[in-house]
Amino acid sequence: DENEGIYVRDLKSGKVRLVKGQAYMLSPYEELWEKDLPAVVEELLSKGNTAKDAKGQSSARNKTRAVTYQTPHNSAIQIYDYKAKKARVVFGPELVMLGPDEHFTILSLSGDKPKRPHVIKSLHLFLGPDFTTDIVIVETGDHARLSLKLSYNWHFEIDKTDIAHSEKIFSVPDFVGDACKAIASRVRGAVASVSFDHFHKHSAHLIRRAVFGADDNDKIRNRFEFTSNNLVFTNIDIQSVEPVDQRTRDALQKSVQLAIEITTKSQEA
């Protein structure tokens, strides 16, 4: 089977090689070699393991068998060869088989709301389009503290024919955390320069302008690109704005009530 293989070690030279896609009989100077993997990789591989033992539990991995991983559609996986000291990127859907000196690049991404580091562990990287949600605490120029729940649409722009270009997507270990920090920094800076009343009236425009910037014609751009790893943000959605302290909450409620009263009076007139 082309999708299966074994690790064979030469007892004379100590060299280990991968034999795949054929029936193989060991020579007198050869033995099966066990490939050890980090505990986190073993755990991630076991989640996708469908083999069961007599008790219905996932059977333990045979360490002499070639390590394989089914890369999902619209995702990428990076494999590093420690002997050759070079990496290769494989795009899904594709079955990956590790050589004796190869190991998976483990992704440790931020998760939860607000974002916390090392929440998500994965072997493959989804290329998008997808979205991520974050909670950002901001303070206006007149010291009103607000909690913003923001949702960002993102995707990776990749030229799969260019090896150097495709490898860039793995250059930032935690792209979720880094991107959310960069966007939150821009949002905080913009909100800090305006009053609470101004932000309450123009929040969407203010945040989009802060994140995406404006062109020469003062028109808000529709993308924010991280050139370090080809990550592109195309939209930002403000899901909710909530005051952090009671004083701001009262001011917001008063502002909303006033707006309703003005609208009602204008309709009655």
Image (spheres, grey):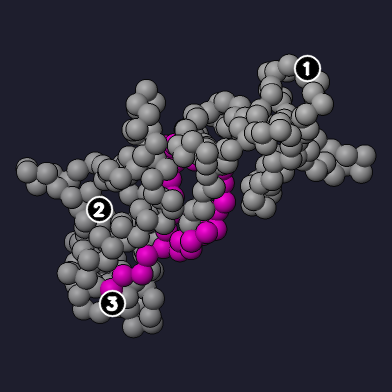
Give the numbered dot on residue 211: 2
What amino acid is found at the position of numbered circle 2 in the picture?
Val
Could you say whether the residue bearing mark 2 is in a helix, strand or loop? Answer: helix
User: Mark 2 and mark 1 in contact (Cβ < 8 Å)?
Assistant: no
Q: Quadrant of residue 130?
A: top left
Looking at the picture, does residue 199 appear above or below residue 81?
below
Q: Residue at x 45, y 37 (%)?
A: 86
Could you say whether the residue bearing mark 1 is in a helix, strand or loop? Answer: loop
Q: Quadrant of residue 159?
A: top left
Q: Position of residue 29 (x, y in %)?
A: 78, 29
Q: In the image, is residue 140 part of the stretch drawn in magenta?
A: no
Compared across the picture, whether 110 is left or right of 51 comes to left
Q: Residue at x 22, y 70 (%)?
A: 192
Q: Please tell me whether the stretch drawn in magenta is mainly helix, strand or loop.
A: strand
What amino acid is found at the position of numbered circle 1 in the picture?
Ala
Give the numbered dot on residue 23: 1
Label 3 – label 2 distance at C-alpha: 21 Å
Compared across the picture, whether 65 is left or right of 69 comes to right
In this rendered view, identify the residue nearer to me: 131 or 86.
86
Label 3 – label 1 distance at C-alpha: 72 Å
